[in-house]
């Protein structure tokens, strides 16, 4: 019988409040929290054994080397490798895939060869193969997806008839949770003459992994997703393949002899580990694996799947809830949308209640394109999560949705507020009088518009009230029409879609902006009030960072929202600089 409360006590961060509320951490597919034994193992290394490995002859180096290589042996046992020589340390699954693409791909694949990936893949298992294909003239094709979020096996077998040289598959989708039948798919691929790489970043935290049973040729995973440190991971590959593969990086540690006439490389696994490795990361990951292995992994998985089932059950009662992906087999991950609400807005609102989820495309843009979505909200569960957390998450989400669907309420009567709009150029006299664009939400001069808006935001008591005011501004901002919401007007660098149109009339900049996320639309309303109808020098001289600090915007916005706001501001400043310089 699992004692979840005792398990949770092993993870210090789970007892830390967020925004004065208990933390509910449902972003485990991005990274997992760390048990105390992992934190202590890294600290102990730096306190008592800090030295480089392999080369030195002193006591500290011997301690570090012993721990470092013992970790390699433990990882080999953890995933069923035949030998520790088959374990290559990397910075994570992404670097491990790149290693295979650079070393195996460049040495073994040729122009015209076919590489198969799937529609479910993380960008890390697409882009390295795209780059390789471009460099050597190979072909890249994707295994299509069925509507339930599982791979189309009939289409896969048809693609195998083309004789691919390599198949790269995710074991479990980070965006939908789909658990692919990789053992069967591997056998079919190898029968067609292909080598198979399995991305185990999302499966290794949940399942017992046996690379011999999977039958694949390469397997990769990341330490930070198995409750270990960031910046460490491993590549497993069959020793015969590794022996034939050339090094992909050069430097210390991976050589046996160097002269100016040539270099003789070290044997496995060292020829793939150039430079000083992440010794503390390796030791921390070893501690994480040891922590996991003291439990019945099947019991942990059963608990996680119970959390998923309960979340789906409760959230199905929320108006507009649409689950995304319903494959027959999956890991404990729920991807969903709410009709009429942008996933980034939902993610920020949940964060205000101490609930951490992931919003966006999850580094799986081709998958989102196939689904016809810009992104989803993702709640991903680990064994330290509880049914009580799932129930609070569902209750808070329902409350947010119901409040969103209710008629908007103003903080003060409409009569006390000034509806403000970009100034009417017809009021201007002289040679600068001409038509300029506006978005129809202002009626006063810009200075009055900005002053009134800032007074409203300053009057809000606390961030929650200020956030509601920003959301109300976003709701009331008129949208650009479809002819303006085009890719040429799209501002890249934001998680959500943002469109920016800048015109220059009468020596002043006139901005039109829109977004598909309400909180960004509210911030756009603030920027329009501050900058519309201003001269370039006025925009550049304005202390916007000081204003953001006063309003606590960067402190309370999520990183993606803060980066999005920064991208918008940078674009406006670029236009102002351009006008100032006469470009």
Image: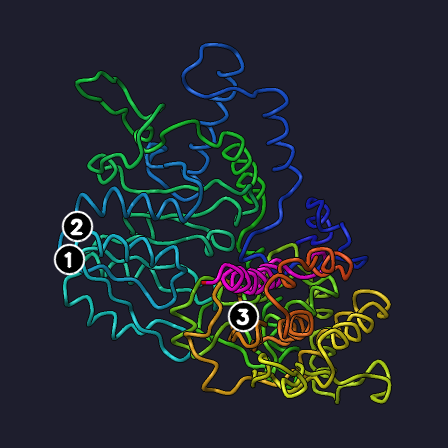
Query: Do residues under tags 1 and 2 come within 8 Å of each other at their CB atoms?
Result: yes
Residue range highlighted in magenta: 554-582
Q: Measure the alpha-carbon separation of dots 3 and 2.
A: 38 Å
Please name the residue shown 82% across and 71% down the image: 455
The earlier-in-sequence mark between 3 and 1 is 1
- Mark 3 vs mark 1: in front: 3
Say which of 348 and 571 sits in front: 571
> Any magenta on residue 110?
no
Q: Which mark is residue 113?
A: 1
Q: Quadrant of the N terminus?
A: bottom right
Say which of 492 and 209 sits in front: 492
Residue 561 is at least partly visible in this image = yes
Q: Which mark is residue 109?
A: 2
The earlier-in-sequence mark between 3 and 2 is 2
- Mark 3 vs mark 2: in front: 3
Q: Which mark is residue 496?
A: 3
Please name the residue shown 82% across and 88% down the image: 414
Please name the residue shown 43% across and 72% down the image: 368
Q: Measure the alpha-carbon separation of dots 3 and 1.
A: 37 Å
């Amino acid at each position: 019988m699992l004692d979840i409360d005792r398990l949770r006590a092993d993870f210090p961060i789970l007892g830390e409040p967020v925004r004065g509320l208990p933390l509910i951490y449902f972003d485990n597919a991005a990274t997992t929290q760390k048990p105390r034994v992992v934190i202590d193992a890294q600290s102990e290394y730096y306190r008592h054994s800090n030295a480089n490995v392999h080369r030195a002859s002193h006591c500290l180096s011997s301690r570090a080397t012993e721990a470092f290589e013992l970790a390699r042996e433990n990882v080999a046992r953890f995933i069923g490798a035949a030998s520790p020589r088959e374990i290559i340390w990397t910075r994570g699954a992404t670097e491990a895939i790149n290693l295979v693409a650079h070393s195996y791909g460049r040495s073994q694949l040729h122009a015209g060869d076919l590489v198969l990936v799937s529609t479910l893949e993380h960008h890390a298992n697409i882009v390295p193969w795209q780059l390789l294909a471009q460099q050597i003239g190979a072909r890249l094709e994707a295994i299509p997806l069925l509507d339930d979020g599982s791979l189309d096996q009939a289409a896969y077998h048809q693609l195998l008839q083309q004789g691919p040289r390599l198949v790269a598959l995710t074991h479990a989708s980070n965006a939908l949770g789909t658990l692919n039948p990789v053992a069967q798919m591997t056998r079919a691929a190898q029968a067609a003459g292909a080598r198979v790489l399995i991305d185990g970043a999302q499966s290794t935290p949940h399942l017992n992994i046996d690379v011999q049973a999977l039958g694949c040729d390469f397997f990769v995973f990341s330490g930070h997703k198995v409750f270990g440190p960031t910046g460490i991971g491993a590549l497993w590959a069959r020793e015969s393949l590794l022996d034939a593969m050339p090094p992909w990086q050069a430097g210390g540690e991976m050589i046996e002899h160097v002269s100016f006439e040539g270099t003789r490389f070290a044997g496995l696994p060292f020829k793939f580990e150039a430079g000083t490795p992440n010794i503390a990361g390796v030791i921390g990951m070893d501690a994480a694996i040891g922590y996991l292995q003291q439990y019945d992994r099947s019991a942990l998985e059963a608990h996680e799947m119970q959390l998923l089932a309960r979340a789906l059950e409760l959230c199905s009662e929320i108006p507009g809830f649409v689950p995304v992906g319903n494959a027959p087999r999956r890991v404990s991950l729920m991807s969903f949308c709410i009709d009429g609400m942008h996933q980034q807005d939902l993610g920020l609102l949940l964060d205000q209640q101490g609930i951490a989820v992931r919003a966006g495309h999850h580094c799986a843009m081709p998958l989102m394109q196939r689904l016809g979505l810009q992104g989803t909200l993702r709640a991903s569960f680990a064994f330290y999560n509880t049914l009580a957390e799932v129930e609070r998450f569902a209750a808070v989400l329902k409350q947010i949705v119901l409040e969103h669907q209710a008629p908007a309420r103003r903080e003060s009567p409409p009569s006390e507020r000034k509806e403000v709009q970009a100034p009417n150029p017809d009021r201007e006299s002289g040679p600068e009088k001409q038509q300029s664009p506006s978005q129809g939400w202002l009626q006063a001069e810009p200075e009055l518009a900005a002053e009134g808006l800032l007074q409203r935001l300053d009057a809000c008591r606390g961030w929650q009230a200020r956030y509601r005011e920003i959301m109300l501004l976003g709701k009331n901002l008129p949208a650009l029409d479809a002819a303006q919401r085009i890719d040429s007007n799209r501002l890249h660098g934001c998680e959500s879609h943002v469109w920016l149109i800048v015109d220059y009339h009468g020596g002043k900049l006139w901005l039109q902006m829109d977004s598909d996320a309400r909180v960004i639309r509210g911030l756009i309303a603030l920027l329009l009030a501050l900058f519309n109808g201003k001269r370039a020098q006025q925009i550049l001289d304005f202390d916007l960072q000081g204003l953001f600090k006063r309003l606590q915007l960067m402190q309370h916005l999520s990183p993606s929202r803060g980066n999005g706001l920064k991208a918008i501001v940078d674009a406006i400043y670029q236009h102002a600089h351009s006008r100032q310089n006469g470009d």
